[in-house]
Amino acid sequence: MATMMQEFTKGLWKEIPPFRLVLGLCPVLAVTNSAENGLGMGAAVIFVLTLSNVIISLVRKIIPKKVRIVGFIAIAASLVVTVEMLMQAFAYPLYQQLGIFVPLIVVNCIILGRAEGFASKNPPHMALADGLGMGIGFTISLTFIGSIRESLGAGTLFGVDLFGPSFEPFTFMVQAPGAFISLGLILAGMNFFTAWQAKRNGVELDPNFDAGCRGCAACKGLEKIVNQKKLERLESAKS
Amino acid sequence: MDIFLLFISAIFVNNIILAQYLGLCPYLGCSKEKSVSIGMGCAVTFVMFMATLLTYLMQKNVLIPFNLGYLQTIAFILVIASLVQFVEMFLKKMVPPLYKSLGIFLPLITTNCAVLGVAIMVHRKELDITTSLLFSVASGLGFILAIVVMASIRERFEISRIPRAMKGVPIGLVMAGIMSLAFMAFKGMI
């Protein structure tokens, strides 16, 4: 039985989203053109994720299994509306910067993934630790990517000039292609580190070593179909 | 002419995946096999069109007259969730062959941020209903284009030697970055 502390810290490194748990990529790419935006988005996600985890865990025995997904979405949506109104009141410039991605927190896989994978099976205090840990891990990741992209793409960090006037900004990094490529390389580095660590500790690495969206219930059904298609193709290639 | 421009730019220049970062989960999750990606793309386009229509009517006839604009997010997501459920039931009963090919994708679409994203975007851009519907179809076509091209490339990855750490999502993301770079060239078109 894992303690609350373990549930909390696993979100910070062992299962840090979105690097280890590849979930909720849309905001990760979209709002990280500056470190500040990343931090703001992360704060909004911490709020929604922690509260939705606790509430879902409280009502987990009441919600019928068949309508649970819609129930989870409704809970998350009401929390997102709260965040939207809070941001409009207290952080309007940030709200405008993040734009459409604030309401889109509701369909972020990380909320549903944690609800389905953790909160609906565990008591509220565990869900609280899990939500808080995952949320903080998500914020750290967003701020990390944001600072890399901002420092290379604009030469600033949290708006402070880093390299002096002779620096030519690498504008590519703050645009869409830079987002994709930097996240891809960070994920690859993370995989490389995991493999190296496993080798050093003499642990056998998981043969299905693939940072897919493992936690996301949505993709699991597809995996089956894809595998079946692959088998068919192999058979036809053989004959 | 403006409408034509909007249509083309939604497919190529402001491609929903490669320029606006919406719908990345299915983009990476369902692009391992070409036939699967085509099915997913068609299902997303269809749901996107229906969802934009319904949420547009909802916004104009319910939310604005009753001064409930702040409930937009929750209202839209519930409309989309019930729409997807309804379409699934309808196809299962009435058009079984179509259900067989598209049915599996439908439950995944509820949480596709591209659908909710387009529904919200048409209101932020203040488009009228015809333009909104055209915009949703164009976004769907852009989604199909991006995901099918990606699936075709990823099928080739199966037989190529990729460093172990890059396998799966990382190489997919780097590929998406290069594709997005290519799509940036369309900016010169308008």
Image: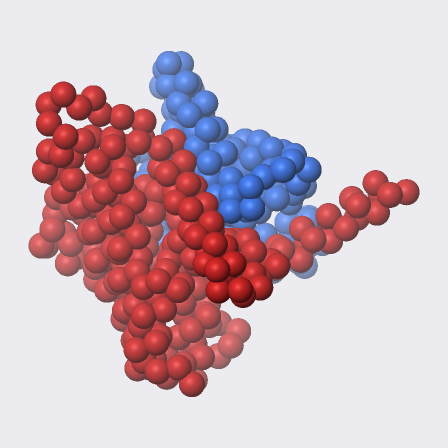
Chain colours: A red, B blue
State whether residue A70 appears in this view: no
Residue at 59 percent of width and 52 percent of height: B105
Residue found at the far right of this picture = A239
Image quadrant where one finds the C terminus of chain B: top left
**In the rendered view, does A35 fall on the left or right side of B15?**
left
Count of labels in the image: 0
Q: Where is residue A2 in the image (x, y as percent from the top left)?
A: 39, 82
Decide which of B64, B151 is in the foreground and name it: B151
Q: Is residue B40 above or below residue A75?
A: above
State whether residue B105 appears in this view: yes
Quarter occupied by residue B162: top right
Q: Position of residue B35 (x, y in %)?
A: 67, 41
**In the rendered view, does B151 fall on the left or right side of A148?**
right
Q: In this view, does B123 lie above or below A132?
A: above
Image quadrant where one finds the N terminus of chain B: top left
Quarter occupied by residue A32: top left
**In the rendered view, does A80 fall on the left or right side of A210?**
left
Residue at 26 percent of width and 56 percent of height: A139
Residue at 34 percent of width and 47 percent of height: A28
Decide which of B97, B172 is in the foreground and name it: B172
Q: Where is residue B26 in the image (x, y as percent from the top left)?
A: 51, 47
